[in-house]
Amino acid sequence: MIQLAAGRLTWPTYLRYWAVGLGATGLVMAICLMIGVDPLHPERTAFAWPAQSVLELRLTRVGSAALVGAALAASGVLLQALLRNPLAEPYVLGISTGSSVAVLVWVLFGMSVFGAVEHGHIPAWLESVFAYGEVLPAVIGALLASVAVFTIAGVTSGATLEPLTLLLVGVVISAFNGALIVLLNSIAPHGNRPDIINFLIGYIDSISPTTLLVAGGVFVASWVAGLLAAPSLNIAALSDTEATSLGLRLARMRTLCFVLASIMTASAIALARSIAFVGLICPHICRVLFGSDHRQLLVTAPFCGAIFLMLADALVQILRGIFPVTVPVGVITALAGGPFFLILLMQRRTTLHD
């Protein structure tokens, strides 16, 4: 169970965070469901309420935006705690790009896999796995990127897994994965070549309910594990010596954080590709509003991420109704996150000099 005895956080306050988060997220979701320019079927009249369009298109789109935002924000909290660096987020550490590489490989070569299923060349039980779309490749890619980062960082920094080394290795892995994305897109047959911008920037679109449920289940399971580990994250925020003296196994805690962050990021990648800065902006907003206790950050930040990305996608829908093109939601988050990142960097530099 989650222990709230340490510090000033009490159960009534903790439950209040949940109530406010759920209420605000539900309200924003209801508003965003009313915004959109989803095409109607020809048989619908101009006076008919597009109920089917809302259920089939807008609901899955808004739900996808909420899930992706929550997953990236929760990942940001874990990675910032892991690295003791407020500028850490999944996009910077190579987790997002590693997951995108795996999804791109799936998109390019998935048809041959489905062909093998149809001809009975692989076990039939794998057919149900393939039916889940890109969730499984995304998880595999994120975990492989995490293993690469941890292995290289472990060789160079030893068993303690120094946060700075993890950050530097993650940046290198991210750049390498970005090059792989460009390479795969270049060598792919023209008819099977996806839009590379979608893998580098990210977008929100209507998806199948099955994919949304599977990705949601993956995220919720990882989120619950993170909530259970939140008291230990508060201890891990201390120096290595202090945390170790209090009985915390730092290497195991850092490994757990990285794995959970990778899985949650993978669930987001499977739905929306690489969307930057959500994992940076939302934890900081919640840290300013509610404090730095990870027990409350891991509750408030995912709700903040869901609200932020739903509003960003609503802005995309509004712009889509004005202009003849669709702006990827990753562009909106990057335009908001770039200046936010620079402000944090300048504040961090000012604090260090003071």
Image (cartoon, helix red, strand yellow):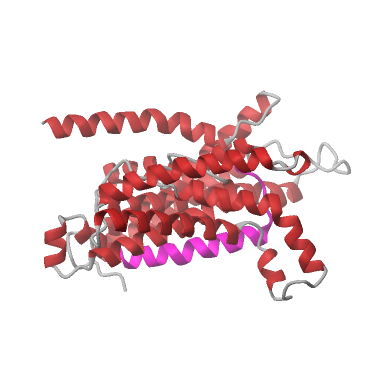
Main SS, magenta residues: helix
Q: Please name the residue shown 38% across and 42% down the image.
A: 171
- In the image, taking residue 271 as reference, residue 27 lies left or right, namely left
Which quarter shows the N terminus?
bottom left
- In the image, taking residue 347 as reference, residue 112 lies left or right, namely right
Q: Start and end of the magenta stretch?
A: 203-229
Q: In this view of the protein, which residue sits in the foreground, 70 or 102?
A: 102
Which residue is at the far right? Answer: 43
Residue 115 x %, y %: 79, 62
| Snapshot quadrant of residue 189 | top right
- In the image, taking residue 129 as reference, residue 275 lies left or right, namely left
Q: In this view of the protein, which residue sits in the foreground, 101 or 6?
A: 101
Q: Is residue 277 magenta?
A: no
Q: Please name the residue shown 68% across and 71% down the image.
A: 126
Which quarter shows the C terminus?
top left
Q: Is residue 225 magenta?
A: yes
Residue 85 to residue 335: above or below: below
